[in-house]
Image (cartoon, rainbow, N blue to C red):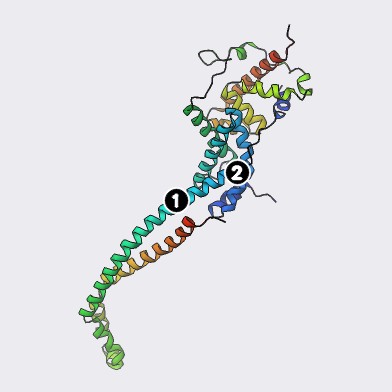
C-alpha cells in the first residue's frame, strides 16, 4: 500500500533518506507540469523544479502536519516560479489586459454559453487548447491549471497564491470567460 | 458551464519532465549534504582540538592537585587499616570531601564528555563528507 505524504515526511525527519525519494517520485511530474504551464520554457521549468524540491527538502522540518502537504508543496512551487519570473523579468502581461490590468472581455461577455461541440471531438484541438491557455494572464492560467489539471480546490488555491477565496472564484470565472473568447475566436470560420 | 470546461481542460496534455531531472535533483541534494557535512566536520575538528588541549591541561592540573593534597593519604587509610577507617568513618569521610579537588574533577569530566561527543560527531560527519551515499 502506498504511504501517505505525512508518513513519508515523518520517515524523512526520522532519518530515512529514501522517504524523500518517494516524495520526489510522487510530485515531480505534476509540479513540473504546473511550472511549465506558467513559464512555457523547458530549461527554466527544470531549474525552477529543482529549486522547488531543494527548498522542500531543506524546510521539511518546518512543515506543519496540520495542513495539506500538497498545498504546502504547491505554495513553494508557486513562490519559486514567481521569483524566477520576476528575476528574469519574464512576466509577460497578456494582450487581453488594459493598462490598469483589467480584462475588458470578461466584463462584457455573457458567461452562460457552452463551448462549440467540435472542440471536444477533434484531437488536433489539444494544441489549440494549449495555445489558448498560454495566452491567458498568469493568474488565470495558474488558477485553471491548479483547479482542473492538478485537481486542487479553490480553498487550496487561495492558500497557495495567498489571495482571498472569493477573489479566486471570481478570477476563475473570468479566466473561463476569457478562455472561451480565445477559443471561439480562434475556431471561428475565417471570412 | 464548469463541467464543460473541466472536460476540456483536463484533456490538455500534461508536459513531462526529462528523465534526468529526477537524478539531477537527488545529485544536487547529495552535494549539499556533503558540503554541510564537511563544514560540520571542520567545526567539530576545531572544537575537538581545542577541547583536547584544554582537557590535557585540566587533567595535568588535577593530577598535580590530587598529589599535593592529602586525599590519597586519607584514601589509602581505608585500604590499609579498615578497622581505624570504620571507627573514625565520619571524620575520615569529612577529610576526604575536604581534600578532594572537586572543581578540577568537574572540569575534567565535562571536558571529557565534550571531547567524546565531538569525536563521535566527527566520525559521523567524516563518513558523510567523504563517502557517497548508497
Q: What element carries label 1?
A: helix
**Residue A142 picture location, percent across and down:** 59, 27
Query: Which circle marks residue B22 in the picture?
Result: 2
Check the image and report above or below for B95 versus A45.
below
Would you say A42 lies left or right of B100 here? right
**Residue B9 picture location, percent across and down:** 69, 27
Q: Residue at x 64, y 47 (%)?
A: A4
Check the image and report above or below for A35 versus A173.
below
Q: Residue at x 56, y 51 (%)?
A: A12
- For label 1, the residue is B36
Check the image and report above or below for B92 versus B27.
below
Q: Foreground residue, A106 or B31?
A: B31
Would you say A11 lies left or right of B57 here? right
Which residue occupies the extreme top position in the image?
A191
**Residue A175 picture location, percent across and down:** 62, 21
Q: What element carries label 2?
A: helix
Q: Distance between the residues labelled 1 and 2?
A: 22 Å
Q: Which of marks 1 and 2 is nearer the N terminus?
A: 2
Q: Foreground residue, A146 or A26?
A: A26
Amino acid at each position: 500500500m502506498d504511504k501517505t505524504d505525512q508518513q513519508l515526511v515523518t520517515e524523512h525527519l526520522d532519518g530515512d533518506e529514501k522517504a524523500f525519494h518517494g516524495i520526489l517520485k510522487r510530485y515531480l511530474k505534476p509540479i513540473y507540469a504546473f511550472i511549465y504551464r506558467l513559464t512555457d520554457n523547458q530549461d527554466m521549468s527544470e531549474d525552477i523544479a529543482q529549486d522547488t524540491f531543494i527548498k522542500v527538502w531543506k524546510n521539511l522540518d518546518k512543515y506543519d502536519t496540520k495542513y495539506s502537504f500538497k498545498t504546502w508543496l504547491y505554495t513553494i512551487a508557486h513562490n519559486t516560479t514567481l521569483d524566477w519570473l520576476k528575476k528574469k523579468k519574464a512576466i509577460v502581461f497578456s494582450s487581453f489586459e488594459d493598462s490598469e490590468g483589467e480584462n475588458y472581455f470578461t466584463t462584457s461577455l455573457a458567461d452562460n454559453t457552452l463551448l462549440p461541440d467540435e472542440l471536444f471531438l477533434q484531437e488536433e484541438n489539444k494544441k489549440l487548447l494549449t495555445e489558448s491557455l498560454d495566452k491567458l494572464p498568469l493568474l488565470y492560467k495558474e488558477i485553471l491549471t491548479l483547479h482542473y489539471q492538478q485537481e486542487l480546490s479553490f480553498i487550496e488555491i487561495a492558500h497557495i497564491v495567498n489571495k482571498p477565496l472569493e477573489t479566486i472564484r471570481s478570477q476563475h470565472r473570468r479566466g473561463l470567460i476569457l478562455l472561451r473568447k480565445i477559443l471561439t475566436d480562434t475556431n471561428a470560420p475565417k471570412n | 458551464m464548469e463541467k464543460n470546461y473541466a472536460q476540456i481542460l483536463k484533456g490538455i496534455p500534461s508536459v513531462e519532465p526529462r528523465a534526468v531531472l529526477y537524478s539531477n535533483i537527488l545529485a544536487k541534494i547529495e552535494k549539499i549534504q556533503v558540503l554541510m557535512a564537511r563544514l560540520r566536520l571542520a567545526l567539530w575538528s576545531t572544537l575537538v582540538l581545542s577541547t583536547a588541549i584544554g582537557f590535557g591541561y585540566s587533567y595535568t592540573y588535577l593530577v598535580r592537585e590530587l598529589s599535593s593534597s592529602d586525599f590519597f593519604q586519607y584514601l589509602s587509610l581505608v585500604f590499609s587499616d579498615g578497622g581505624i577507617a570504620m571507627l573514625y568513618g565520619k571524620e575520615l569521610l569529612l577529610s576526604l570531601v575536604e581534600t578532594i579537588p572537586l572543581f578540577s574533577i568537574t572540569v575534567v569530566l565535562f571536558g571529557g564528555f565534550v571531547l567524546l561527543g565531538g569525536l563521535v560527531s566527527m566520525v559521523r560527519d567524516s563518513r558523510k563528507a567523504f563517502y557517497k551515499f548508497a
